[in-house]
Image (tube, rainbow, N blue to C red):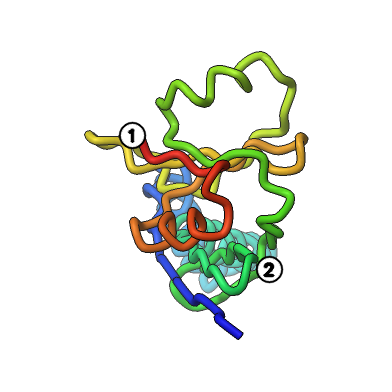
């Protein structure tokens, strides 16, 4: 039995508004806590609520994706703040219609189709663009950033569906 195992990590671009919201919530927490210690239970409640909000915003502000390819399956995990892992989705590559770079002419056939867009990439368009687009089961357009080893592993099981131009 020949099992191929490839994993790849991609850090999502930090979101400016989420970082600003996190800082604002921390400032509100500190000010409300200081006012609450002088007197007023209402300010302590606001401080606790803002602190909890800052925690959850901080989890989503630092985001990484891990792609794991094992035996014809591609699994995508989301890592929040480098401390929590959450399984996002698993793709059976037997149901994949096509995998090609984002700007490839092979994707022209799918431009006008109504597909659900799912983005598991870094969110940045670099030069050259490393993002790939996978059309999955005729219903999803999955955008992700695999490394060359992962693309080669996927191409070995579906050579007519994977393009690297």
Q: Is residue 69 above or below residue 89?
A: below
Q: Height in image: 138 above or below 32? A: above
Q: What kind of element bears circle 1?
A: loop
**Of the residues tagged 1 and 2, which is closer to the observer?**
1
> Could you say which is closer to the camera, residue 24 or residue 7?
7
Compared with 10, 39 (above or below) is below
Q: Earlier in the sequence, mark 1 or mark 2?
A: 2
Which numbered disc covers residue 125? 1
Is 98 left or right of 130, judged from the image as shown? Answer: right
Q: Identify the secondary structure beneath mark 2.
A: helix
Q: What residue lies at 65% left-to-right and 34% top-to-bottom?
A: 117
Relative image position of residue 135 (x, y in whole percent): 64, 38
Instruction: Tell me: 73 left or right of 7.
Output: right
Q: Residue at x 64, y 60 (%)?
A: 46
Q: Indicate which disc residue 41 carries.
A: 2
Q: Disc 1 to disc 2, how far (Cα)?
A: 48 Å
The quarter of the picture where residue 52 lies is bottom right
Q: Residue at x 50, y 44 (%)?
A: 162
Q: Is residue 104 left or right of residue 75?
A: left
| The N terminus: image quadrant | bottom right
Q: Total number of numbered labels?
A: 2
Quarter of the picture containing the C terminus is: top left
- Residue placed furthest toward the top: 112
Q: Can residue 40 be seen? A: no
- Residue nearest the observer in this picture, 61 or 67: 67
């Amino acid at each position: 039995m020949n099992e191929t195992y490839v994993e790849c990590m991609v850090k999502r671009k930090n979101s400016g508004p989420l970082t600003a919201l996190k800082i604002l919530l921390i400032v509100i927490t500190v000010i409300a806590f200081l006012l609450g210690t002088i007197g007023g239970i209402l300010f302590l409640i606001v401080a606790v609520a803002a602190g909890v909000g800052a925690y959850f915003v901080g989890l989503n502000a630092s985001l990484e994706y891990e792609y794991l390819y094992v035996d014809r399956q591609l699994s995508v995990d989301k890592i929040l703040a480098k401390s929590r892992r959450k399984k996002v989705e698993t793709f059976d590559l037997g149901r994949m219609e096509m995998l090609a770079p984002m700007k490839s002419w092979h994707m022209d056939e799918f431009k006008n189709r109504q597909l659900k867009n799912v983005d598991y990439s870094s969110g940045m368009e670099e030069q050259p663009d490393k993002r790939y687009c996978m059309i999955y089961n005729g219903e999803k357009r999955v955008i992700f950033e695999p490394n060359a080893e992962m693309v080669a592993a996927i191409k070995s099981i579906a050579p007519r569906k994977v393009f690297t131009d």
